[in-house]
Amino acid sequence: MTERRIQYAAGWSGWRKSSYSNSEGGSCVEVLDGHPAGVPVRDSKNPHGPALFLPATAWSVFVSAVREDAF
């Protein structure tokens, strides 16, 4: 299995908070758009921590499930 964790992604610019994150400090997710091989994702409460790297197809499936309230 390929490692899908990015240890030092804090220096990457362009992170944005997901529109599904709440403003009360709860489930806050940031994504980095425009990466050619997939979607880096991190916890916005820990921007200097590791990020996960998801293939674009996996990210699409995840976003669809969130929109359908499947969780």
Image: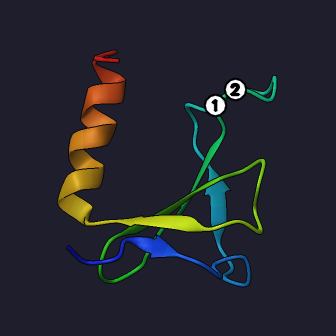
Q: Amino acid at mark 2?
A: Asn
Residue under circle 2?
22
User: How much space separates mark 2 and mark 1, taking CA atoms?
Assistant: 6 Å
Residue 54 vs residue 17: left or right?
Answer: left
Provide residue 56's location: percent of width, then percent of height: 25, 63
Q: Nearer the viewer, residue 20 or 70?
A: 70
Q: Residue at x 18, y 58 (%)?
A: 57
Q: Nearer the viewer, residue 16 or 41?
A: 41
Task: Give the vertical position of 19 relative to 12 (above or below).
Answer: above
Q: Residue at x 62, y 68 (%)?
A: 50
Residue 2 vs residue 40: left or right?
Answer: left
Residue under circle 1?
27
Residue 15 vs residue 57: left or right?
Answer: right
State which tag comes first along the sequence, 2 or 1.
2
Residue 50 vs residue 64: left or right?
Answer: right
Element class at badge 1:
loop
Look at the image and tell me in which quarter the C terminus lies.
top left
Provide residue 60's location: percent of width, then percent of height: 24, 48
Which class describes the residues within 10 Å of circle 1: few (<14), some (14-19), or many (20+)? few
Give residue 64's quadrant in the image. Answer: top left
| View extreme (front): residue | 1
Q: Amino acid at mark 1?
A: Ser
Provide residue 63's location: percent of width, then percent of height: 33, 39
Mark 2–mark 1 CB contact (< 8 Å): yes
Task: Give the vertical position of 71 relative to 53 (above or below).
Answer: above
Give residue 53's quadrant in the image. Answer: bottom left
